Amino acid sequence: MISIKNLHANIEGKEILKGINLEVKSGEVHAIMGPNGSGKSTLASVLAGRDGYEITEGSVVFEDKNLLDLEAEERAREGIFLAFQYPVEIPGVSTTNFLKTAMNQIRQYRGEKSLDAVAFLKLMKAKMKLVEIDQALLSRSLNEGFSGGEKKRNEIFQMAMLEPKLAILDETDSGLDIDALRIVAHGVNSLKSKDNASILITHYQRLLDYIVPDFVHVLFDGKIVKTGDKSLAMELEKKGYDWIKAEHGSLETI
Amino acid sequence: MSTDDQVLEEFTSKEYEHGWSVDFEADEAPMGLNEDIVKFISHKKNEPEWLLAWRLKSFRYWAQLEEPKWGNVHYPKIDYQALKYYSAPKKGGKVKSLDELDPEMIKTFERLGISLNEQKRLSGIAVDAVIDSVSVATTFKETLGKLGIIFCSFSEAVLEHPELIKKYLGSVVPAADNYYAALNSAVFSDGSFCYIPRGVRCPMELSTYFRINAANTGQFERTLIVAEDDSYVSYLEGCTAPMRDENQLHAAVVEIYAAKNAEVKYSTVQNWYPGNKEGVGGIYNFVTKRGICAGDHAKISWTQVETGSAVTWKYPSCILKGDYSIGEFYSVAVTNNYQQADTGTKMIHLGKHTKSRIVSKGISAGKSQNSYRGHVNISKRATHSRNFSQCDSLLMGNQCGAHTFPYIDVENSSSQIEHEATTSKIGEDQIFYCKQRGLDEESSVALIVNGFAKEVMNNLPMEFAVEAQKLLALTLEGSVG
């Protein structure tokens, strides 16, 4: 589905990603773990097409398309979804209105007809159950005054509505209590199919108790330094990241 | 140049949609302004002597005044002698029915999306269409007449309802009120008059559509709305003008009189030509709008969406004279390129238990300057009164400016005032968030801006709200920063 080869990226002249290689196939769940500052969120941003990053080397192919040539909105329409670590507030725009606008632009891009109000509402009702989200919340201004848990659930709700091929969850577990974590994980698990894939970016192993990854990668100093299965996550949980640091040299003096 | 700057560049280069003009054969006054021109206008309209006298008095007063300088707007000195003060399409003017109207005229309004054909209109909106100095058509007059509602051009009202005009003209905005009001009182040419009798709820929206067509011509219209006891009316005003390199002057006066328990809702979507991206041309929009809640429990609500004009100077105000009367002002003012807007409101509380609410949303893009100027005055007698003001500014890019000038005077201790103000910038984060969900840049901006202005937009009548939303997006197309 997505093939990342030797990806290097700078922000304001500073190299953050130093040669990422990653291959994700349909039906797979990959977890990317790593200490703070290792480049996890940068990787998510670069894949989603946020401005301000300079790609100096490497390639990303998503479903036969050169992803790096596409605008952020084109990537979204091709089926890439990023669940934000810090979802943005948009005053005066309800989630419902926001999603309807987004969905119809995506459908238009794909040459599909817009959903009418009834079909949209029906779809919404079905997906609301999945993440136990209340309609009242969806009528409020997007993310404005939402609790941390509500924001994250709203992200997963949007993911459920947009049915992406590749979902990238950037620290979706951070700041969640156990109940919210369980709901979010349930949502992600229910959406899993043989035709889609997810990349979970997380600092802690906790989320992986609920969503079992096929692969666990350790990102350190802009590179993937270790890949394994779920047991690698357990090991990290037990030993922390210090032994990785010891193995690969501490972060260069910044 | 970063991507943001490029987008900003593209966005601000959006062309004005209504910039065309039509060659009507026109009946015009010679250029310049003097007593003879005032007489010329008055005679053209067969006005009674008292009105000519009123005009001349206004003119003489105006002639001694200086243009106000306190607004946060800058423009070259206007040469009032280089303008024409009257221009009427020859085939326009008085027609008994719409069938007699010049088909070109009907087409002109159709191009603007205004149908003058009553049968073709889907919604219940009665229209008074004004081109340059004259009203060319008023629809649904008969339907409204059955309820005793008078809705006609101002010129017609002068001739047919002189007693009402004599009673109310200048009663809310006196000729000597300010420089532009005095000018308007001297040379006003047409506009709309609307009278709602006691106890009548006007069943349809009344609207006036103003179009400046002729070159070198100022438009000075006058609107007067009188709502008797226990009546209700919702009134809409729309405006466009052709693209011309010179600046054109528009100095209107709107007066609203609301008697006991009457409610008047006045909505404006102002889309005068704003000038090009270099700031050449555009309308100078110097308007005096004021309403008086003369009776107890009266209510006047102003809603405005200001997207056009090179320079806007406008403060729709309420005099809350009746006890328990209510004044509201909801405004979205958008400026782009080199536009300048100095707009806001005055709420003058005279009656007891009076309430006012001000919600102002300023959106600045390009190199524009956008100012909110408001005055809340609660007099000694106006005990237990309340005001709530909220002024929010949204900035796009880093070359524009937003300013807030709130003046508050409270002369008693039982009244309450609240004032909230915020300034924010459309964030890259917000735009990226939208784009990540599949929205293109323009839709993202439109969504964010409309969200910002929602509280005001919600006050517009339905059909107008849709138009206004599109207009907001259009005005700002490409202004991300």
Image: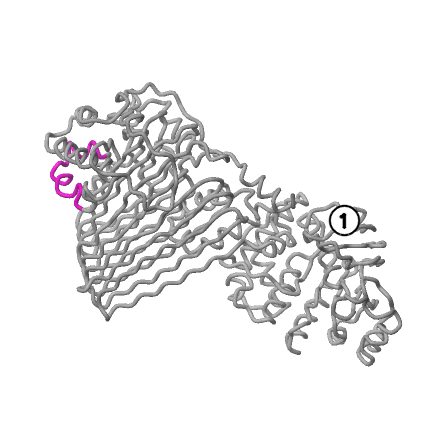
* Left or right, B95 with reference to A188: left
Element at badge 1? Answer: helix
Any magenta on residue B163?
Answer: yes
Q: Position of residue B464 (x, y in %)?
A: 40, 45
Screen quadrant of the N terminus of chain B: top right
Res A19 → quadrant: bottom right
Any magenta on residue B29?
Answer: no
Q: Residue furthest bottom?
A: A238
Instruction: Please rate how many residues cluster around mark 1, counting C-alpha atoms within 10 Å: few if below 14, some from 14 to 19, many from 20.
Output: many
Which amino acid is tagged 1?
A: Leu
Q: Is residue B480 visible?
A: yes
* Left or right, B228 with reference to A43: left
Q: Position of residue B465 (x, y in %)?
A: 42, 47
User: Eyeballing the image, is B271 above or below A186?
Assistant: above
What residue span does the magenta drawing correspond to?
A: B154-171
User: Eyeballing the image, is A74 above or below B183?
Assistant: below
Mark 1 — residue? A67
Q: Chain of mark 1?
A: A
